[in-house]
Image (tube, rainbow, N blue to C red):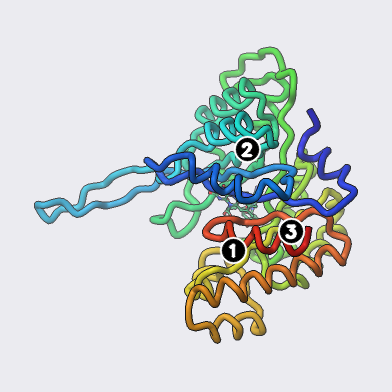
Amino acid sequence: MATAAQLIRDLNKPAFSFELLPPLKGNSIKRVFNTIDTLKEFNPIYINITSHRDEVVFKNTEKGLFERKVIRKRPGTVAVAASIQHQYGIKVIPHIICSGFTRSETEYALMDLNFLGIHDLLLLRGDNSQKERFNQTSEESNSYAIDLIHQVNDLNQGKFLDSTIAEAFDTPFSFGVAGYPEKHEEAPNLDSDIYWLKKKVDAGAEYVITQMFFDNQRYYDFVKKAREAGINVPIIPGLKPVTLLNQLTILPKIFHVDIPEAFAREIRGCKTDADVVKVGIDWCTYQAKDLLANGVNLIHFYTMMATQSVKEVAQRIY
Ligand code: FAD
């Protein structure tokens, strides 16, 4: 079976992929299937499934004290990936993250994925815990995506954490990584971020999926800089249709991306979220058409709270 990287390289017409989240703990997988049922007519070449770390939360008790609890709000990345592959036969790319997982837990997850016949991964550091102002990893965890890449490369050669050497997997894992057209929030500058991105590509990442952006020029500039730095793998643009009034401030805050003034003005002019959905679809379509006109042949969509909007955009461009 071709890897995601091979499928991307062999594309000869505009293609579609999207990311979805595992359901919130306790919710049915039907929500995931509903998203896929809404979007499968556009023949996604793969579906990404996000991964989420444990969160520490403090709950108020009856005695007026706070109780510390560790919860994972969205468990099940591996199972959701397997379930989608089984139900739909569509290629899946589960995300594997460093933060919140020990190397041993990661090793076991990778072994499960191998047994399930899932060999495409997106390797990431992972978001910080909401209680952390910056990334804190334990000694048992990988610190950066590059460390995770080394772990996967070792495993591809049959090297396990306890130094036992076993048979290499019949099908090695193939993987992509994240890139940030507007720079990662912690990077001192874009050049530094690209320096580390190149390290990830040199270590075996076969493609880059970008953070969402709302100004295509940021993406074009990023690709140019990456190429100048010797990064020659596909850089897949990530788009998200805006669907809520409050995303005007929430998206820049969470994802560290700018919303261009022309678009911000349109959102500000909306009275309701339903109005925002319309301008969000229009803006995303405009971005997608421009990307396709400029030689991009695969666009990756972020579907969280935007499945119907992604469908509308896809209907207009594919
Ligand atoms: P890294 O590549 O490790 O980089 C992190 C920062 O450190 C950057 O500033 C980089 O410049 C710098 N850096 C990298 N390596 C080194 C080094 N060796 N020494 C010093 N500095 C270094 N988060 C989740 O929790 N779950 C998900 O499923 C998820 N999916 C995502 C999908 C996409 C397409 C994108 C773009 C992001 C996703 N994220 C997800 C968010 C991501 O995990 C965070 O943005 C995280 O803070 C950085 O991840 P990374 O893999 O880019 O990190």
Residue 61 picture location, percent across and down: 15, 51
Q: What quarter of the picture does the N terminus occupy?
A: top right
Q: CA distance from mark 2 to mark 1?
A: 20 Å
Which residue is tagged 3? 237
On residue 185, the disc is 1
Viewer-side residue, 184 vs 13 = 13
Viewer-side residue, 5 vs 63 = 5
Residue drawn at point x = 79 percent, y = 53 percent: 298
Residue drawn at point x = 21 percent, y = 48 percent: 67
Residue 261 picture location, percent across and down: 64, 84
Dot 2 falls on a residue whose secondary structure is helix
Q: Quadrant of residue 90?
A: top right
Say how many tags the image has. 3
Q: Is residue 257 above or below residue 35?
A: below
Residue 139 visible at all: no
Q: Is residue 82 above or below residue 206?
A: above
- Specify whether 186 is left or right of 23: right
- State yes or no: Cβ of the residue under disc 2 lies below 8 Å from any atom of ligand 1: no
Dot 1 falls on a residue whose secondary structure is loop
- Specify whether 19 is left or right of 7: left
Q: Residues within 10 Å of mark 2 (few under 14, many from 20)?
A: many
Residue 179 picture location, percent across and down: 70, 55
Viewer-side residue, 183 vs 118 = 118
> What amino acid type is highlighted by mark number 3?
Pro
Residue drawn at point x = 66 percent, y = 42 percent: 122
Which residue is tagged 2? 148
- State yes or no: Cβ of the residue under disc 3 lies below 8 Å from any atom of ligand 1: no
Q: Is residue 266 above or below residue 253?
A: below
Q: Quadrant of residue 75?
A: top left
- State yes or no: Cβ of the residue under disc 1 lies below 8 Å from any atom of ligand 1: yes
